[in-house]
Image: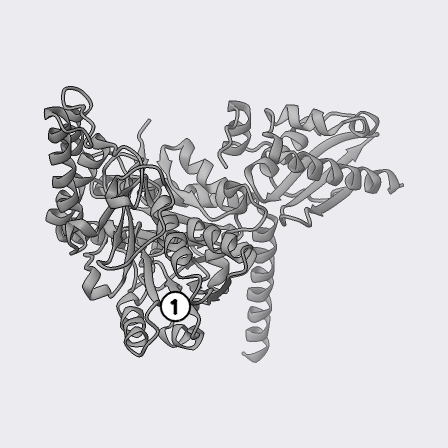
Amino acid sequence: MRRVYLDHSATTPVDPRVVEAMLPFLTGKFGNPSSVHFYGQEARAAVDRARRQVAELFGARPNEVVFTSGGTESNNLAVRGHCETTADYGRHIVTSSIEHSSVRGICEALERRDWEVTRLPVYEDGLVRVEDVRAALRPDTVLVSVMLANNEIGTVQPIAEIGALVRERREAGQKHLRLHTDAVQAASGMRLDVDELGCDLLSVSAHKLYAPKGVGALYVRRGLRLAPQNVGGHQERERRGGTESVPLIVAFGEAARLTRLELEERAERIRSLRDRFESGVESRVADIVYNGDRARRLPGLSNISFRFIEGEGLLINLDMQGVAVSTGSACSSGSLEPSPVIRALGRDDELARGSIRFSLGKDTTEEEIDYVLEVLPRAVENLRRLSPLYQKAVGSRQMAVGSALRVKDVES
Amino acid sequence: MSVTYSDTFKEHLANPRNAGTLEGADAEAEQTNPVCGDRLRLALRVRGGRVESARFLAYGCPPTIACGSALAGMLEGMTLEEAARLTRSDITEAAGGLPPRKQHAAALAYETLQEALQQAEARP
């Protein structure tokens, strides 16, 4: 069966060049970077090189990079690590209502420990407003944590403007206030620069960049102290104890290097395929709603709600035809509530349940998109034929058309 | 949460049996799961105490569709007494099995069946 992978926001396949770079560190070059002998120094040099490569991905200095096990750990280290060191100065966090579940979960955990959290709304476009951030800031706010690009709808938040605001407040005397941004989704689709963004902490994950799972990084601006969340080892300049996973770190370094080299070319190609996909869907399927601002979003992501049907049914129908996507329906997440991100856009439950995320990757082809455009309309049609909501809507439309005709008859 | 569905289940989803509505139905029941919003509609035509035709419509997660398909498929040809003896697990089994967290779909199908049978029996 033909298979088309359109779930690159979930994870990406490992680039063969990345595999090649990491393999020697799974075999002969197995040393512990903390060892003083040859083996250890060989591993240390590889970790140092990877650290430079990852730092270059977001315009940082190598010693501002902490390797972690991935995006979730980076977010934990950033938010908890900062909050634990600043609790004496304030216990208020500003975040958005569409953060990744890791940031959401950490904020909820802090609330149980008497922190206050302000969750900024997003509007129908899926974007946070800088004025809302300004209004939410208090003298005891120590952290603003807003993601750079959303993982479900791909909208790109105005982090540089928020960064400027945070800096302004800090310069006015609120010296413990910092900005964290979760750039896990953004890194594959847009160029990152920590100085342009004005952030103090930035999370990235390797497996969204064609490297293996299990490794990520946190950018920590020079001078910022974090309470380590993994203690008991001196690694990562006391910020994250534990022997470094050299092969994964090397892989991440190579993936970061390739991303930096190829980003514009990848993004351009992916954007044009995404646009081809969306215009194809529009011309073949009625009653769809796009989720999130279509201009300010990542190039490879398209989130569409299909009216009258439920997302997991569509997901499984597509999967049976070899097309892999993801959905914001409650069924898939195992919760009863459909995607809080889609709900935050002001969409009703039915639209939230019928949302599907198509996320393209650097190796997605035109033929693959055309195949999806062939099977998707059929799958939607099949599910709509079963849907009592659709039958009702079609029934009332036919009645509306009927009465319109009758009115016209009377008029003529 | 990841769930694995059986081939029978997927077959119900890919090629639902008895989907649609019925002209001149003797019973037309619709139930909604108040928690997740899933809906199931079941229409029956009964002749001589036997279900001659059964059709379903479903909005909701795949288990709801599979249970609707399985239920409507097995109802045809059954007497009303036989239909009344069907249990949730009969429906689950006919749908190809359900993961533990999706049992509510069989419950919804069962409730819809009970409402349809009441309507059918109330008819002269």
Locate residue A10: give its quadrant. Answer: top left
Tell me residue A97's x, y (percent).
46, 61
Q: Residue furthest top?
A: A28
Tell me residue A168's x, y (percent).
28, 76
Regarding residue A224, the answer to whether it shows in the image is: yes
Q: Quadrant of the C terminus of chain A?
A: bottom right
Pick the front one: A200 or A82:
A82
> What residue appears at the point 27 percent right and 53 percent down from the top-left corner?
A186
Question: Looking at numbered disc 1 in the image, what kind of residue is underneath it?
Answer: Val
> What residue appears at the point 43 percent right and 77 percent down from the top-left corner?
A135
- According to the image, label 1 marks what residue? A128
What SS does tag 1 mark?
A: loop
Q: Where B86 falls versus A63 (above or below)?
A: above
Regarding residue A382, the answer to whether it shows in the image is: no
Q: Where A10 falls versus A134 (above or below)?
A: above
- Relative to A48, B91 lies left or right: right
Q: Where A220 falls versus B58 (above or below)?
A: below
Tell me residue B15's x, y (percent).
52, 31
> What residue appears at the point 67 percent right and 34 percent down from the top-left corner?
B106
Tell me residue A24's x, y (percent).
14, 24
Pick the front one: A385 or B46:
A385
Task: Specify few, some or many for label 1: CA neighbours under 10 Å numbering under 14, 14-19, or 20 or more.
Answer: many
Pick the front one: A277 or A128:
A128
Locate residue A173: give its quadrant. Answer: bottom left
> What residue appears at the point 36 percent right and 40 percent down from the top-left corner?
A231
Pick the front one: A65 or A198:
A65
